[in-house]
Image: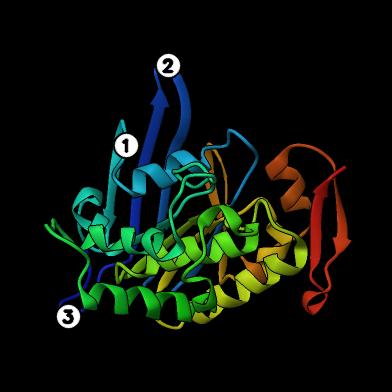
Amino acid sequence: MTAAGTAPPAISLTGVHFAYGEVPVLQDVSLDVARGEFLGIVGPNAGGKSTLLKLILGLLKPSAGGIRVLGEPPRRARRRIGYVPQYPGFARDFPIGVEDVVLMGRFGLGWRLGPWTKADRSAAAAALDEVEALDLRARQIGTLSGGQLQRVLLARALVGEPQLLILDEPTANIDQRLEGEIFELLAQLNRRLTIVVVSHDIAFISAYVSRVACLNRTLVCHTTDSIDGQIIQDLYGEHVRQIQHDHEHTARASRA
């Protein structure tokens, strides 16, 4: 319970369990994400990261436990969430322009009939400008690089005017330089949005996020200054190699 006049957490999970059939995926997961926080979620493949996001988005229901998002059940809060998937939900060679892709994010504001309005197009232009991609407005999606596409998908999430931004591996298919650019952009957006990002790179995101949630069926949160090699090895269950990253001399972890 929150005190009178105090906003509830952006995300609150209490004792959440989930299984696909008889296969347990999440066990007794509890987590509060404060409004305005920048949280990273990391963990091995099949550790439950994507399932956790689907629960927060209201696409799945827990078998036990409770979830509240922006003070409401996840399905009711969905219109106030901006989501950037790991893989775009359309073929890269589909004949659609950048502006139209971004405008799709306006559907989250409610049912509509008729063509896009001037206000819709202005909002799309503003979202593209915020992610430094306005010059791509007239391009076809199939002509974009991986980094350009991520900026466009981020603009699509922002154009719906969300309060919470969730990203699933936003830098999985781009190089290290572009990875830094995307996270610098997210750090700027965090000034006005609560952000949750799933990443494979625990050490890299530690330079940007306020906490790291380590998920492998169960979940443990760490402040970024407490992340060390032992925590990484315990999480991934194998030996990991620490490689120094250029950004603020942050260590980068990879599997040996």
User: What residue does disc 1 label?
Assistant: 60
Q: Which mark is residue 22?
A: 2
Q: Picture coordinates of residue 47 (x, y %)?
A: 57, 37
The three-letter code of the residue at mark 1 reads: Leu
Q: Picture coordinates of residue 39 (x, y %)?
A: 51, 64
Distance between mark 1 and mark 2 Cα atoms: 16 Å
Above/below status of 219 relative to 186: above
Q: Depth check: 253 or 107 in front?
A: 107
Above/below status of 59 relative to 117: above
Distance between mark 3 and mark 2 Cα atoms: 42 Å
Residue 33, visible in the rendered structure? no
Mark 3, residues whose alpha carbon is within 10 Å: few (<14), some, or many (≥20)? few
Asked whether the beta carbons under mark 3 and mark 2 sit within 8 Å of each other, the answer is no
Q: Depth check: 8 or 140 in front?
A: 140
Of discs 1 and 2, which sits in the foreground?
1
Q: Which mark is residue 5?
A: 3
| Residue at (47% x, 69% y) in the render | 138
Q: Quadrant of the N terminus?
A: bottom left
The three-letter code of the residue at mark 2 reads: Glu
Above/below status of 65 relative to 167: above
